[in-house]
Image (spheres, rainbow, N blue to C red):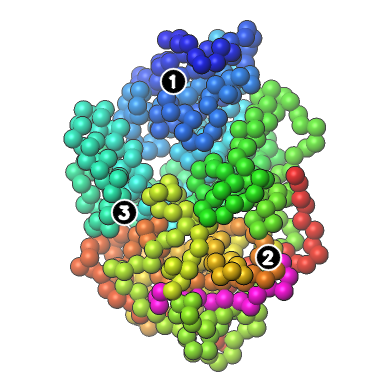
Amino acid sequence: MKSSTFDPSVQIERNVSVPMRDGVKLAADIYRPAADGAYPVLLLRTPYNKEDAQTMNYAHPAWYARHGYVVVVQDVRGRWASEGDFHPYAFEAEDGYDTIEWAASLPGVVPKVGMYGFSYAAAVQWLAAMTRPPHLSAIAPAMIGSDSYQGKTYRNGAFSLALLQSWVLFVAQDTALRQKRPDWASELTDLYAGIHAYYKRLPLNDPPAAVKSLAPYYLEWLAHPTRDDYWKATSLRDHYGSIDVPALHIGGWYDIFIDGTIENFTGIRRSGTAAARDAQYLHIEPWFHMPWSRYVGELDFGPEAANRIDELQLRWFNRWLKGEEPEEPPAKVRYFLMGSNTWQEAESWPVPGAETKSYYLRSLRKANSVSGDGRLSEEAPGEEFPDVYVYHPSIPVPALGGRSGAVPDLTPMGPRNQLPIEVRNDVLVYTSAPLERDLTIIGEASVELYAATTAEDTDFVAKLVDVYPDGRAINIAEGIIRASFRNGLERQEPVPPGQVLRYVIPLGPTAHVFKKGHAIRLDVTSSLFPTFDRNPNRLINPGEATEADFATATQTVYHDARYPSRLQLPVIPDGKAVKERT
């Protein structure tokens, strides 16, 4: 059905039926330039209501139509106006293929299709691309990972609680209305409004009846706590060789999926088809899990961080769908260097020239809290006493900013002052001396931690922090590891109580300048709640733990000549050129 629009240069067709191969019909809105002519297609497939296509901080579809595209915005299967039952990702490969080929056959179009969107709307791009639709010409997946298990549902064995519980409550509300259960929809709305209390509900695999009935996939996720075949079936990293389409990988330094976004870029450049390898580009903003603005968390990253994602995507699709080559060949990698708040370019990732530099954990008395004497030193330790703290899951250390993946009011994301948690005695704090010159890090940061625990399982969390001269402690990156997963993601192994073990905790990729007069800080603790579930300190599946299972764990972190725990940073040496681009 055609409808009028606020913009006379654009025509809209609402709720156009798109047949899938199994007979299910999906609903789409089509935005067309009013001027005569044939135009390539931009496709956005979303579970979040095609009528609300602008809420995710992209320009309205009419904006893209004004720039010479037929824009198709579609509700995925089982969502909003589309038929069928919703099960995350289960039908997106085939439905994506069918929709792309349908769109390419529409009257008045050039048979070239590009796809855009972030998060779930990015995952559907990859699932469709793996099926190689003949008319898919380019994609722009933003803020999505490389694996269904690692970095998405779980990270090194820890369950991504805030992201998944908030997402399930949100999407299940529409399912309740589709099934004519307004009582359930009201219950889910109330749970969503009181999400912070809901995060504490245990066991995780016994949610309210509405969640059990409307989102059975949530229980499936909990039933597969290791990276088994259930996850591998939809994992992009296992199918890079199937990708033969140009892709603009868009990420954010504070996004939960930043490591997976970069892995997709590097993996396809290495293992994609010959046509795809040289057509992969990476663009990283200082944002969290949403196309945002210059104001992220508690920081202003300046005018260079303003949201220009639509102009970026327009140039991208003009190149691959309209043949408009840029005057100057773009760099393969373009990223925002936080701290200097400038754009940099490179031809590969990791960027050339970075050198791994070690900062050793040290203390004389104790490193507990910001009041302790923990320090980071370039000098390796000799004989030193370890640091000890106690972790109990009933009083977890709260997540304050970072990479939660939930929207900001559900779990704070991005850069925030960490002092409110660094005053706790169950947080070890190690701080360098003030820097005598700027220190630039670009690449993967990690922590090599030698630690023992009295528990049969526990978590270790590490957080990289920039300490400002005024005392603010702003988080840069963080990581977690569940001790029972220390030897791989496909199996759990109990921790020998009291035995000193080596843990490698990836902090993920970043690009940041620690300015002169600032200090480098590392926080070590055992919880990041509710970004991740609380480890009960027992070897038990995340979904099954109750408060009755909670046990106290005494954690001992070693930093001596035999066990030199250290922070490892990808440092750009002084004088090493960094290619800057405005």
In this picture, is 284 found above or below 17? below
Q: Secondary structure at mark 3?
A: helix
Alpha-carbon span between mark 2 and mark 1: 50 Å
Alpha-carbon span between mark 1 and mark 3: 35 Å
Q: Is residue 310 visible?
A: yes
Foreground: 479 or 544?
479
Question: Which of the 4 image quarters holds residue 26?
Answer: top left
Question: Which of the 4 image quarters holds residue 269?
Answer: top right
> How far from the left and from the top, in percent, is residue 277?
67, 41
Q: Amino acid at mark 3?
A: His
Camera-nearest label, 1 or 3: 3
> How far from the left and from the top, in percent, is residue 92?
43, 32
Q: Amino acid at mark 2?
A: Lys
Residue pictured at 75% horizontal, 44% vertical = 582
In this picture, is 363 found above or below 170? below
**Badge 1: few (under 14), some or many (20 or more) residues near its Cα, within 10 Å?**
many
Foreground: 156 or 414?
414
| Badge number at residue 565 | none
Pointers 1 and 3 in contact (C-beta within 8 Å) = no
State the extent of the magenta-drawn residues as a range: 424-439
Residue pictured at 55% horizontal, 92% vertical = 383
Residue pictured at 70% horizontal, 49% vertical = 343
Check disc 1 and report the residue beneath it.
Answer: 28
Check disc 3 and report the residue beneath it.
Answer: 196
Secondary structure mostly taken by the magenta-highlighted segment of the chain: loop
> How far from the left and from the top, in percent, is residue 435?
68, 73
Check disc 2 and report the residue beneath it.
Answer: 515
